């Protein structure tokens, strides 16, 4: 009698069970691989976003007017005054002497309305209204001045909006020019950059900065902290920043220090 070839019921059941086990194992491996890929992609996106923000802020803060950086941890805002021009001066009308102009060798030209400061002390003074008696560390440029730097460049006279008596002298005979502040504020999980708002704000908060332009710089931020060590005659200012980005249960923390290139 010829025996028929084929699978028995028991063999088929065992085969189905083995295929199910292999299938479940492969499914778990694929799911785990996809999960790892998604986590890695999320982490890379958070890192890219964090690096963009820290590098952008680094480039802006390092060229700030010395002692102009101000922080409000309550509203998670940081603000500074970007330098629009630098110059060395020949002589300075120190109190009680007064003058409506100073002679300087600038880096480039001035614009009407630029503020100049000698030996900046703190951010509040830099933003304050110029005193009516003209005695101050600051003055305001009266008119546009075109200047092209060259090897044979000569010192130029800068007209001021009022007769000024400077209350401080720089050991390096250096002055800084600035016009409007720049600020970054964390609002919810989003970081915004503010610019072109008046110096005369009441407080450092998004509401007070809304008179200027507002630009989204980053999102998915869980925490942002800023700390400032102001400059002195013997050391540069230092800004410490910390950001924590989070998305899909992934967290990335970035700590970044910015050394302000200028001293008073």
Image: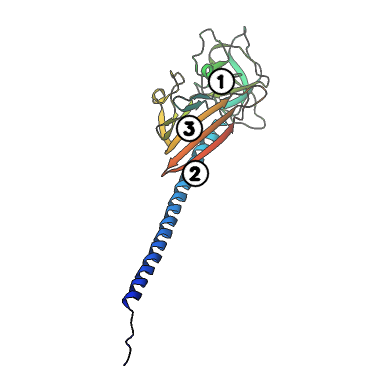
Are the two marked residues, 1 and 3, in contact with CB atoms closer than 8 angstroms? no
Q: CA distance from mark 2 to mark 3?
A: 15 Å
Q: Which residue is mark 2?
A: 47
Number of the label disc, if any, that sits on residue 245: none
Dot 3: element = strand
Are the two marked residues, 2 and 1, in contact with CB atoms closer than 8 angstroms? no
Compare marks 2 and 1 and give the one earlier in the sequence. Answer: 2
Do we see residue 218 in this rendering? no
Quadrant in the rendering for residue 248: top left
> Residue 81's x, y, as percent?
52, 25
Q: Nearer the viewer, mark 1 or mark 3?
A: 3
In-front residue for pair 29/98: 29
Query: Does 226 sit above or below residue 249?
Result: above
> Residue 107's x, y, as percent?
60, 29
Residue at the image point whose x is 51% and y is 13% from the top: 130
At label 2, counting other C-alpha atoms closer than 10 Å, the crowd grade (few under 14, some 14-19, many 20 or more) is: some
In-front residue for pair 153/188: 188
Q: Which residue is mark 1?
A: 116
Q: Nearer the viewer, mark 2 or mark 1?
A: 2
Q: Which residue is mark 3?
A: 224
Residue at the image point whose x is 47% and y is 41% from the top: 251
């Amino acid at each position: 009698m010829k025996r028929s070839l084929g699978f028995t019921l028991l063999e088929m059941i065992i085969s189905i069970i083995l295929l199910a086990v292999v299938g479940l194992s492969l499914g778990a491996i694929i799911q785990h691989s996809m999960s790892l890929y998604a986590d890695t992609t999320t982490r890379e996106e958070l890192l890219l976003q964090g690096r963009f923000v820290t590098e952008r802020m680094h480039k802006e803060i390092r060229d700030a007017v010395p002692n102009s950086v101000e922080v409000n941890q309550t509203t998670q805002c940081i603000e500074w005054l970007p330098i629009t021009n630098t110059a060395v001066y020949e002589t300075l009308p120190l109190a009680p002497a007064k003058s409506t102009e100073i002679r300087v060798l600038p880096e480039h030209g001035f614009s009407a309305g630029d503020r100049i400061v000698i030996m900046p002390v703190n951010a509040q003074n830099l933003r304050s209204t110029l005193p009516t008696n003209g005695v101050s560390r600051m003055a305001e440029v009266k008119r546009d001045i075109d200047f092209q730097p060259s090897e044979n460049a000569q010192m130029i006279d800068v007209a001021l909006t009022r007769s000024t008596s400077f209350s401080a002298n720089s050991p390096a005979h250096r002055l800084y020019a600035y016009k409007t502040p720049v600020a970054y504020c964390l609002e919810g999980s989003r970081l915004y950059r503010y610019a072109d708002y008046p110096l005369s704000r009441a407080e450092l908060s998004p509401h007070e900065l809304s008179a200027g332009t507002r630009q989204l710089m980053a999102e998915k931020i869980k925490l942002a902290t800023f700390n400032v060590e102001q400059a002195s005659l013997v050391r540069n200012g230092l800004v410490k920043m910390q950001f924590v980005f989070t998305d899909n249960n992934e967290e990335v923390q970035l700590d970044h220090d910015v050394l302000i290139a200028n001293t008073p």
